[in-house]
Image: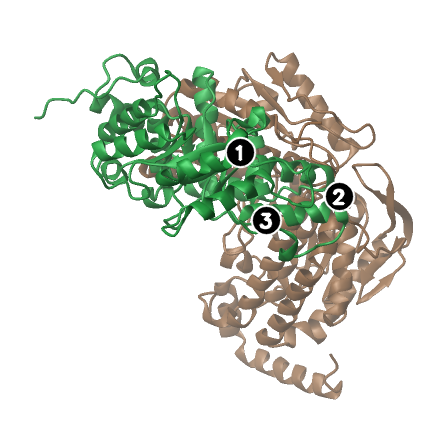
Chain colours: A brown, B green
Amino acid sequence: MSFLEYAPAPESTALLNLQSEYGLFINGEFTAGSDPTFSTISPATEKHIATIASASTGDVDAAVAAARAAYDSTWSRLSGRDRGKYLFRIARLVQERARELAVAESLDNGKPIKESRDVDVPLVAAWFFYYAGWADKLDHAGLGANPRALGVAAQVIPWNFPLLMLAWKIAPALAAGNTVVLKPAETTPLTALLFAEIVQQAGLPAGVVNIITGAGATGRALVNHPDVNKVAFTGSTSVGREIARSLAGTPKKLTLELGGKGANIVFDDAPIDQAVEGIVRGIFFNQGHVCCAGSRLLVQENIHDEVVERLKVRMATLRVGDPLDKNTDVGAINSAEQLQRIRELSDIGDAEGAERWSPACELPSDGFWFAPTIFTNVATSSRIARDEIFGPVLSILTFRTPAEAIAKANNTPYGLSAGIWSDKGSKILAVADKLRAGVIWANTFNQFDPASPFGGYKESGYGREGGKQGLTAYLAPAAKATAAARIAPAVKAVSAAKAKSASAAKGGKK
Amino acid sequence: MSIDRIVSTASRAIEVVGGDLTESSLKRYLNGIPGVDAVGLEARAADLGSRSIKTTSKAWALDTIISLIDLTTLEGADTPGKVRSLVSKGLTPDATDPSCPRVAAVCVYGDMVPYAVEALGAFHGDSVDGGINVAAVATAFPSGRASLSVKLADTADAVAAGADEIDMVIDRGAFLSGRYGQVFDEIVAVREACRRADGSSAHLKVILETGELNTYDNVRRASWLAILAGADFIKTSTGKVAPAATLPVTVLMLEVVRDWYRLTGEKIGVKPAGGIRASKDAIKYVVAVAETAGEEWLQPHLFRFGASSLLNDVLLQRQKLSSGHYSGPDYVTID
C-alpha cells in the first residue's frame, strides 16, 4: 500500500448531540413549524441527519413580531457595552463548542473537516469577537453623531458557508443594535439550529435572534414582510435580482452579496509554486462553492504550459472523499441539484471545445461528488468562462500583457474578487487599481478577516460586509440620523423619557 | 570593468546553464529562478503539517524515519567511546525489538571517522546491504571559515579514513556578498576531494546553513547552486545555528529537487538537520517529502534526517503503537 493513501483518520461524531427533529427558533424557544417538515441529509452519504421544520407565512409573521418586540422592549434600549457583552459571550461559546460545530458543518454541508475546523468555525468566533468590540464604540468611531439601529433585519444566507455566513450577518446586526430573523439555506440548516442553542446558552434576550427554516417561499415571505427594516441576502444573482425588484420603492435597506466569476491573474514573474497553491486554494477550497472563487485563471501565455503542468502535478495529490476524514482536501458537492448544474456546465465546456482534465481519483458511490477539474483552451466567449459554475471547475485562459489581463479580468458581469500573482509590488498595485472587483488578493487567495470589508461590483451585488463598512450596513445613515435629531429633538426627548418609564414599570425585565 | 571570471567546469552546470560558464552567467541563471512568496510557502508547509497520520500509516512512517536517520554526534567533547556508543545505538536502536530497522548512517567529525569505521566492522556499508554508512562533516565545519586548501585536506582526510559521505558547508559569506562563483568552485573542488583512489567517490551533502541565508529566495538560489556544482544531497543546517531545519525551508528544498528531476531526470537528496526532536514533527517531514517530491524520495539515498534525540522519541512512539501504552525514557537506551 502506498503511504500517500493515508490510513483513515475520521473525526468522531460522538460529541454531536443532535435532536431528531428541530423546530423554528422564535422568541427564544423552539416551536413546531406550520408547514410540512423536511429532511436535511449528509451530501456525502445521502443519509438523513434530522427532520427540520418549515416556516409558513404565519410563522414568519410570528418571528418578525418577536424580533420587533425584542427590539422595542429590550435590545434597542441596552447600552452598547451590554450588547457587546452578549456578543463576547456568543463568541466564547462558539469557541467552546468549536469541535461540535465543525463536525456538524461538515456532516450537513459536505465540506472537509479540516476547512470547517481550521477556517469556518475560527472565523465565526473571530467575527463575533470583532463586532462585539464595536458595540460600545458606535458613537466614537466616525459613524456620525448619533448612529442608530435600523430595527428588524431579515437575513437570508446560502449553503456554502452556513455558519460563517450566519456570523457575517448576525454579528454586525446585533452590534449595531438591530434584532434579526435569519433563514439558513434549505440544505444546510443544522449549524444555524445549533447556533440557536448557543443563543439560549448565552442568555440573549428572547426574540433578539430568531432562526426560521424552510425553502424559497419562507425566504420570500421573510424579505417581503412589511415590518422588516433591513434585508441582507447572500446567494445567487437571480434570487438577488428578484429581492431587489420586490424591495424597490419600500423603505427597506438592502445589501446583496451575489455571484462571482473571479479572475486569478498569474504573471510570468510570479512566485510559481505559491501561485500554483493559490490557484488550488482559489478554486478547490470548499469544492469551489465560494462566491469569490478564482474560477477563471488568467495566466500569462509564456508560462501557460509550465503552470498547467505544475497544477496537474499538484492536483494529483488532492484527496477527495469523506468530509469527516481529517486528510480530505475536497469534500462532497452540497446537493444533487448543484451537482447537476456543475455537470451541465462542464459538458457545455466540452461541447464548446475546451479541454477537460481531472486527476485520477476514485469517487464514492453514494453521495454527490465531482472530481477537481480544469479546462484549458477556454475561449473568453465560452459559457464556462462567463457563467458561475460554483463547483471545483477551473477555466484557464491566457493573456499577453498587463493591459490584456486587466481587460479580460474585468470582462464579466460580475465583480466580486480577483487575485494577482507577481513578485513585483509596483505591478500588483498598478493592476489592482484597474480591476473592478470588491476584493483583490495579492499573492494569496480566499483569505478572510472580520476587519476587512467584503462585497461586490456590478452583478455581484452591493453593500459591504465586514469591518466598519459592514457595520454601517446596519445603521441609519449618519446624515439622516442627525437630520432627524435636528428636526424633532423635543419629540425624541419625550419618547426617550416615556421609554425609560415604561421599562421601569416592567421592572427592568431582561 | 572587471573581466568576467570563468568558474570551474561541472557537467550539470554546463548542461543546464550553458557551455561558457562564468561568474555572471551563473549569477544570471540563479537570479532568473522564480521568487518565493514567504507567506505562501509557510502556509503550504503548515498545511502539510496538518495531515493526520494514524495506525498503519503511522507505523510505516515511524519505521521509515528510523531508516532515514543520520545519527549524529558533533561535539567538542566527542571521544572514541562516545562514537562507539553511537554506532551501537545505530545498529540496535531498540534493544527490546530486533525487528526495529537500523539508521542510515552515523554522522561524526572527521577525526572520529576511524573509530566509527572500526566500531561498525562488518556492518559498515550501505543501507541496501543492511549496513550503516559513516558520514563526516568537513570543510571547517560548522563555520567554513578556512582556506580552500584546509577544507580540501579536511575532506580528503575523512574520505581516506573511510567516510562514505561528506557533509560540507558552503561559504555563506561568499554567497551573501554575491560571489556565487566562489561558492560554486569550492563545491566542485570538494567534490573532487571526495574521490577515492579506486575512482569511486564519497557522497557529497552540501550544507546551506539556511539560518544564515535568512531569506527563502537565498535558500532556493543556494540549493540550485549546490546542485549545479555537483551535490548529491542538499542539507539545511549544521545544527549549530538557529533556526536550524524548518518545515518551510525543507519544503522549498524539496521543490527544488523535484524541479531538478523534472528538468534532468536526476534525483537529488534532501537532508533537514537540527531541531527535529519529536516523532510528530518528523512525520510532518515525511508527509512533505511524499507530497512534494514524491514517495520514491522516502529512501536513504534521497532523504535523511540529521538528528540525535529524535531516534528515542520515535522508538517510544513505536513501542506505544505495538503495546498500546506509553512507556518512558528508561525503556529506550541512551547512546
The lab-note entry on whether marks 3 and 2 share a chain reads no
Q: Is residue A343 above or below residue B112?
A: above
Give the left or right position of residue A39, taking residue B68 as reference: right
- The residue sitting at 78% across, 43% down in the picture is A187
Q: Which of the two discs, 1 and 2, sits closer to the camera?
A: 1
Badge 3 density bin: few <14, some 14–19, many ≥20, Cα 10 Å: many
Residue at image x 47%, y 22%?
B267
Q: Are marks 3 and 2 in contact (CB under 8 Å)?
A: no
Q: Looking at the rendered structure, which numbered label has been put on residue A10?
A: 2
Quadrant location of residue B5?
A: top left
Task: Look at discs 3 and 2 and give the one toward the viewer.
Answer: 3
For disc 2, the chain is: A
Tell me which residue sits at (39%, 42%) in the image: B237
The 10 Å Cα crowd at callout 1, few under 14, some 14 to 19, many 20 or more, is many
Q: Amino acid at mark 3?
A: Asn
Circles 1 and 2 in contact, beta carbons < 8 Å = no
Per the image, the residue denoted by label 3 is B312
Expressed as whole percent of the image width and height from the top left, the position of residue A500 reads: 66, 84
Tell me the amino acid under the disc marked 2. Answer: Pro
Q: Quadrant of the C terminus of chain A?
A: bottom right
| SS under mark 2 | loop
Q: For the view shown, which residue lies furthest in the left direction?
A: B1
Residue A300: percent from left, percent from top? 42, 23
Compare residues A404 and B48 and report the one nearer the observer. Answer: B48
Judging from the image, mark 3 belongs to the subunit labelled B
Q: Position of residue A180 (x, y in %)?
A: 70, 61
Three-letter code, disc 1: Ala
Mark 2, residues whose alpha carbon is within 10 Å: few (<14), some, or many (≥20)?
some
Q: Which quadrant holds residue A345? A: top right
Q: Chain of mark 1?
A: B
Q: Which residue is mark 1?
A: B104
Q: CA distance from mark 3 to mark 2?
A: 29 Å
